[in-house]
Image (spheres, grey):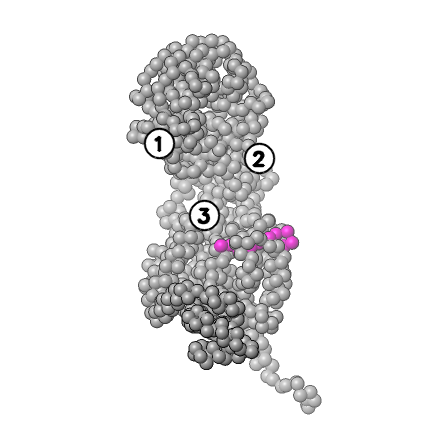
Amino acid sequence: MTLQDENIRQEDFSAAIQNSYAEYGVSSNARAIPDARDGLKPVQRRILWFMFRNNWTSANETVKSAEVVGTVMGQAHPHGQEAIYDAAVRLAQDFSLRYPLIDGQGNFGSDDDDPAAAMRYTEMRLSRIGEIMLRDIAKDTVPLVPTYKQDPKVLEPYYLPAGIPPAVNGQDGVGLGFATRVPPHNLREILNACIALFDRPQMPALELMRYVQGPDFPSGGSIIGDEGIREYLATGRGRVVHRGTARLEEDMRGRRLIVTEVPFVGRANVKTSIAKAFNDGKLPGLMFEGHIPDESSEQNGTRIVLPLRKEADPADVLATLYQHTSLQTSFSVQMTFLFGAENEPARTPRTVGMVELLRRYNEHQLNVLRRRSQYDLDRAKERLHLVEGLIIGAVHADEIVRIFQAAKDRQIARTELIKRYKLSEIQAQRISEMTLAQVTRMDLAGYRNEKKELQQRIEYLEDLLAHEPKQIALIKEEMQSIANDFGDARRTVILGDEEASAPVAQVESAIESRPVLVALSTDGNLKAMPANTYAGKTNAGTVRGDERLQAVLRSRTTDYLVCQLSTGRVATVRVARLPELTRAGRPELARSFLSLEPAERVVALAPVSAFSEELFLLVFTAEGRVKKTALSEYLKVDEKGSPDLRLLGKDSIARVLVSPGGGDYVITTSDGKTLRFSDADLRPTGRVGQGVAAISLARGASVVGADWIAEDDDGSLWVASSNGLIKRSLLDEYPRKGRATGGVATMQLSGGASIVGAAVVDPNQDVLLVSSGGRTARVTAEGLPLVARDRKGSTGMKLEGAEKVERIVVLPT
């Protein structure tokens, strides 16, 4: 057979297939397997690079995602817009990446399988940590090559400088004959390991575990055992068991397991597997109809509610969940990356252990540092050469002006400068570009100082490039700086085999009942504190750090907080859900636990252990009204809140307390009056209502304190005024009168002062005065003598200037 066309060649078919398949395999793996130097796939790298190139950085406004996708597709990535947008969305998801490299604005999906909004609706920019991936890229730290567009002005990097190691955010992908699945890790741990590997490059995997505990998933949870961790750190292959976290909630409404953290498969996957196991009859201890209750939110985090049957053992149900649902899953690790020579594209896939991967990363950082230093050195030398010419020009400025005036054109003048002053073409060109006025004003002293600084800079850079130990020391310093700036606490807990095999202990520890203090801040936020926070009397006198306190109450972790809201609504939350912080710790936003309306806040609290019919919740208002309701009426109130007290006009909540009934109520007003009346005068009503009159107020007066006392209570009433005075008087001095009448004098007031707070204080309690200037003073019973109820009291706080006492806080000691 004769071939007529010279462009047609004869070739062995099997050889052609092998060669074509090999080329396809290289291309496929290059798209699916990340580079060992920066841990990125090409599409991810191109997205970050062109965002940086177009200055879509954290310091600037976000841009439409469609603009980012269009730029990447038009300039560098020969694939569809959906592939590019999907990759960009993942880089912005904090539930997919441990440290998102893109700051997204808009709907970027959720771990409940909600998709991201279309690219025309969302916006994005580089995150601060994303910019670290490209730091110093403008200093020739990595090779840049033309994109598929073949425009010499449009270049892209083979790889990024990558200030964040490749194992931090993890990766997964399937190529041709190779696959990769790298779990995310803690940034601080990985960088500490990199620093240690500079000192011990041949560190064994077992020793590496001193620095890298194991995977650190965005969703938290726990890893069961460390055998799989040791295996993949050493070989790059292994299997770890990732378990979600659940705790038990129990009250009069029943018991329920609350899933607060899920494995790295998403909430939707976990809920689907639980529903399937329930429908298959594998979870008889649970009870729900239709869908699984999911109260997760951005404020509350993950909160999947699993109601328990009365007879169910919570530990058994939890163990069954781990066995039959994806609340416990296996994560198969395969740390496959592409390797290649420095300054060349990576094409060789290899599965490596963590030591080898981080060692390769350290080599990459050394190369980046050397290229950056050489770039800086070259620029410094170029500038020094120019400055030396400018110094000559400044010294001979008058003569140079005459040369330019005498020359027919600037080229002749430039030639004369080179000949007379031995200047280079570059130096002469720079001087010739100046106007004559600029020449005469040349700053000789400034150029000489700059020359000195440049010489020192050049000496430093040459010394750095000549000594590898100094390069390593600088890289260590930069790594430590990144760890300090962006590192955070580990989210995923590593459990030993004994801990992992005891789900009973895990559930029981979740319902441990212990005493705590609950604090309400003036802005309506909440926190728990250790029960002994205010123990002892060492803090008598002025105390700083408590200026935000509104109230402090004794409680237990198993109690519920009845939260009275500024709108008159009421909500409840379990004390165990509050973060336990120190005395100086800033309270958690109430919106993290409660569903609040705009501008709504918590204004008063009452801890309760049970919603009993024998206990009553009393709500007092500033305008002298009160509502008494059986606690059992609040049984179905939850974090979402319910209507309670109808506030009239501009009235507001002044005090909330729990009473067993009987006894008396003591109410104090801002104009120095106190009324004591019997509980028998106050009938209970339904939960929703406006209440009844508690006290008759003078014009301009308001309720500033209210308490319940037993009939035989021999305690004392503490009263404080705005001018810093405080007194305590025996309760026996306050006669019982009828409800809705006027009170008796409780403190002498002068100089326009008013009462700011009053409370029945037990012998084991102190009182904190809080001023308008943010100062506090702690007053003890030992330091405050008993006086008659109509006296003016003693100085509790020395005020400065126009400062006034704003409120009192009773401190449990």
| Residue sitting nearer the eye, 470 or 65 | 470
Q: Position of residue 677 (x, y in %)?
A: 47, 12
**Of labels 3 and 2, the one closer to you:** 2
Disc sitting over residue 543 in the figure: 1
Identify the magenta region.
119-128
> Answer yes or no: do the residues labelled 3 and 1 have beta carbons within 8 Å?
no
Residue 402 on the magenta span: no
- Examine the rendered structure and indicate whether residue 238 appears above or below residue 665: below
The residue at the point 42 percent across, 17 percent down is: 750
The residue singled out by tag 2 in the image is: 598
| Residue sitting nearer the eye, 547 or 148 | 547
Badge 3 marks a residue whose secondary structure is loop
Q: Position of residue 322 (x, y in %)?
A: 47, 46
**Of labels 3 and 1, the one closer to you:** 1
Specify the amino acid type for callout 2.
Pro
User: Distance from label 3 to label 2 (Cα)?
Assistant: 33 Å
Residue 127 on the magenta span: yes
Say which label, 3 or 2, has the lower sequence index: 3
| Residue sitting nearer the eye, 669 or 357 | 669
Disc sitting over residue 221 in the figure: 3
- Examine the rendered structure and indicate whether residue 490 appears above or below residue 178: above
- Examine the rendered structure and indicate whether residue 549 appears above or below residue 440: above
The residue at the point 55 percent across, 32 percent down is: 600
Specify the amino acid type for callout 3.
Gly
